[in-house]
Amino acid sequence: MVYTAVLAGCGGMSKGWLSTIAEHPLLAGRIRIVGLVDLDPAMAEARAGEFGLTEALTGSDLDSVLAQTKPDLLFDVVVPGARGNVVETGLRHGCHVLSEKPMATSIEQGRALVAKAAAAGRVHAVVQNRRFISGVRRIRRLIESGALGDITSLNCDFFIGAHFGGFREDMDNVLLLDMAIHTLDAARFMAGKAPRAVYCLETNPKGSWYRHGAAANAIFEFEDDVVFNYRGSWAAEGANTSWESAWRIIGTKGTLLWDGDAQFQARVVNGETGFLRDLADIDVPAPTDPDQTHGHASVIVDFLSAIENGRPPETASNDNIKSLAMVFAAIQSAKTGQRVTISA
């Protein structure tokens, strides 16, 4: 089946979306872009020209473009503040909606969008592309195998001196709201545990080029006494980690180290004597399905498969709201200086 789609929001991120749709082998020929919408209609026209979308309708009025094109899908690539209205408009026109993250600017808005998608009988999902990479899928499979024993803690470091310019540098809670949700969602996915509470310290380090909240340290309590420690900064120069963070995952039998790229080290106890027990290396298994390791393309493929098979996609909004709840609970904790219970 070939799906028709309108893309709303033709800024810099739209180029990645349109390139993925047009060029990735998993998506070749599966989606036809019939409309492009932006507050600046010249942006929509320019993006249509750049990608040879000569038959696509362009404009600044999403309602009008959806009414005229009647697409199957709406791709929501707008800035977070505009997301709620865009998703609601798409659902009202009968579209399945795939949104950039974060899925909402508040947990209350997130709940409202989940309810509207359910009432409309449409699929609403969120682009959590970083859970669809080989390393994250491999770790999930290792944890599920029980080779590390019962998981007791996940620990990650995210330190990158990222100079975006644009809207991010003027955002409130920029690290937690715009980036940390990727890492928090990955931790929740890898652990297979629900978040219960958080204590967070948020700062804007000296020399930061962001207006607010470029760094954060958070301790999350997951179910079954699992602890997730997050340390991050977008204003840390000199020794960048991977965009996927650097991880140490500890279980009752051993530990996994992952640099966020290609290097894994997993060791388990191999003896019953000695002050420090002997250790043995273990393999980190390959992903079960290689098609689930292509980031953004795999998110879109899962979205289409969910529509076709009448099942929830992995990043459905009614599940992704749990990751969003982690973000807003961390922000509330930072504001109040108190431990905050997480509720989606």
Image (cartoon, rainbow, N blue to C red):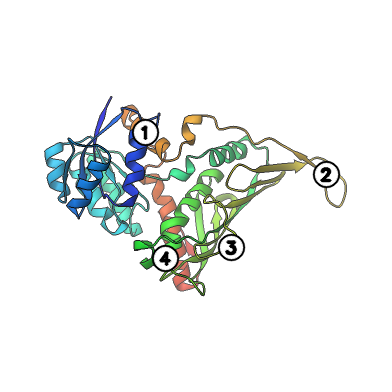
Q: Is residue 244 above or below residue 215?
A: above
- Cα–Cα gap, marks 4 and 2: 44 Å
Query: Residue placed at 36% from the left, 33% from the top?
Result: 23
Question: Foreground mark, 3 or 4?
Answer: 3
Instruction: Indicate which disc, 4 or 1, sits on the residue closer to the N terminus.
Output: 1
Question: Foreground mark, 2 or 3?
Answer: 3
> Which of the 4 image quarters holds residue 307?
top left
Q: Secondary structure at mark 2?
A: loop
For badge 4, the amino acid type reads: Asn
Q: Nearer the viewer, residue 294 or 152?
A: 294
- Cα–Cα gap, marks 2 and 3: 36 Å
* Viewer can see residue 329: no
Which residue is disc 4 drawn over? 173
Which residue is disc 3 drawn over? 238
For badge 3, the amino acid type reads: Gly
Q: Nearer the viewer, residue 281 or 251?
A: 281
Instruction: Indicate which disc, 2 or 1, sits on the residue closer to the N terminus.
Output: 1
State the image coordinates of residue 323 (x, y, percent, origin top left).
44, 52
Task: Report crowding for label 2: few under 14, some 14 to 19, many 20 or more residues within 10 A (C-alpha).
Answer: few
Task: Report crowding for label 1: few under 14, some 14 to 19, many 20 or more residues within 10 A (C-alpha).
Answer: few
Query: Residue placed at 56% from the left, 45% from the top?
Result: 191
- Cα–Cα gap, marks 2 and 1: 49 Å
State the image coordinates of residue 43 (x, y, percent, origin top left).
22, 51
Which residue is disc 2 drawn over? 278
